[in-house]
Image (cartoon, rainbow, N blue to C red):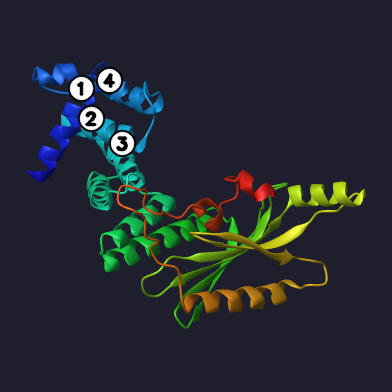
């Protein structure tokens, strides 16, 4: 019942905001028997092309209004995911956790990044065991996708405080190649961290301009966490992959001694989700332009 009251408030807010025509709330007010494809299309248009600022509050109330009005439509499971992310960005961990659970109950398949967002939300609500489970599902889902497409050679190392996964990409993206990656995952509560080896074309271009000469391909090692990114140094031809492997494992083993946990934010501010997930869990073909630097 608590959720019904919450959803009805969202519907009322949506009507008051003047966008009820977009998602077809007027027919629901007259108790028409069911939602159809046109209603789902109006909702999807409201999400894809907002008529007001596309704030987290807008997406949350729009998704929740559709969920309340059309609970039997299969699009509801995706609406729960929209609401979950919007609630996360609104600083409402309990609401976000509810919608992730509802999406899963409706049959949604969470991507690794969505699973990691769920882990952060559950950490914020104090459900540490479930948070660890969601985090581990995110990592295992990412690794399984790489293995299923033969995109990488995988290995794992048990160390004090957790596990370090080694990923050697077999078909790196041209130009933005990430050739190797190591991820540390804590055994207990905590967020992952990665070290990756990649091209740095923008850095090479800057050096060419500064030195007035053509600079060959520049390879760097980069350390990523949910809160930060830092270049560790250049990878030159005289450094073997075995040396890099040992260095990465040593660096990440030290991280597991004191892993990052949830970064606190003020009430109403976005929950501090991992901002570099698509790089920490790199998949060839899903390049991030920030890797140009």
Q: Is residue 239 left or right of residue 259?
A: right
For disc 1, the marked residue is 15
Q: CA distance from mark 1 to mark 3?
A: 14 Å
**206 and 182: which is toward the camera:** 206
Labels 2 & 3 near each other (Cβ < 8 A): no
Q: CA distance from mark 4 to mark 2?
A: 12 Å
* Mark 1 or mark 2: whose residue is earlier in sequence: 1
- Is disc 3 surrounded by few (<14), some (14 to 19) or many (20+) residues within 10 Å? some
**251 and 145: which is toward the camera:** 251
Q: Quadrant of the N terminus?
A: top left
Q: Is residue 71 visible?
A: no
Mark in front: 2 vs 3:
3
For disc 2, the marked residue is 66
* Mark number displayed over residue 226: none
Residue 191 image offset from top left, x and y in percent: 43, 65
**36 and 189: which is toward the camera:** 189
Residue at image position (39%, 30%) is: 54
Labels 4 & 2 near each other (Cβ < 8 A): no
* Mark 4 or mark 2: whose residue is earlier in sequence: 4
For disc 3, the marked residue is 57
Residue 117 image offset from top left, x and y in percent: 38, 53
Q: Considering only vertical position in the picture, is 99 above or below 240?
A: above
Residue at image position (69%, 50%) is: 293
* Mark 1 or mark 3: whose residue is earlier in sequence: 1
Residue at image position (86%, 46%) is: 209
For disc 4, the marked residue is 19
């Amino acid at each position: 019942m608590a959720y019904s009251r919450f959803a009805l408030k969202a519907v009322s807010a949506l009507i008051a905001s003047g966008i009820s025509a977009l998602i077809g709330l007027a027919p629901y007010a007259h108790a028409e028997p069911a939602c159809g494809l046109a209603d789902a299309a109006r909702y999807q248009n409201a999400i894809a092309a907002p008529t007001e600022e596309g704030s987290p509050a807008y997406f949350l109330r729009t998704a929740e209004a559709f969920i309340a009005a059309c609970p039997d439509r299969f699009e509801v499971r995706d609406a729960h995911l929209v609401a979950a992310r919007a609630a996360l960005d609104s600083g409402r961990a309990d609401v976000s956790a509810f919608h992730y659970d509802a999406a899963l109950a409706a049959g949604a398949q969470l991507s690794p990044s969505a699973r990691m967002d769920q882990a952060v939300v559950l950490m914020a609500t104090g459900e540490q065991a479930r948070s660890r489970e969601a985090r581990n599902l995110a990592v295992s889902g990412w690794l399984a996708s790489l293995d299923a497409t033969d995109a990488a050679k995988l290995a794992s190392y048990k160390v004090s405080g957790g596990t370090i996964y080694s990923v050697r990409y077999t078909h790196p993206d041209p130009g933005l190649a990430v050739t190797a990656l190591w991820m540390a995952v804590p055994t207990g509560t905590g967020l992952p961290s990665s070290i990756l080896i990649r091209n740095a074309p923008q850095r090479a271009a800057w050096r060419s301009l500064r030195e007035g000469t053509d600079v060959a391909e520049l390879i760097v090692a980069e350390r990523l966490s949910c809160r930060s990114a830092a270049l560790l140094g250049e990878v030159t031809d005289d450094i073997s992959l075995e040396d890099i492997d040992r260095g990465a494992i040593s660096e990440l083993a030290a991280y597991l001694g004191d892993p990052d946990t949830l970064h606190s934010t003020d009430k109403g501010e976005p929950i501090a989700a991992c901002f570099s997930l698509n790089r920490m869990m790199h998949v060839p073909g899903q390049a991030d332009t920030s890797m140009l630097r």
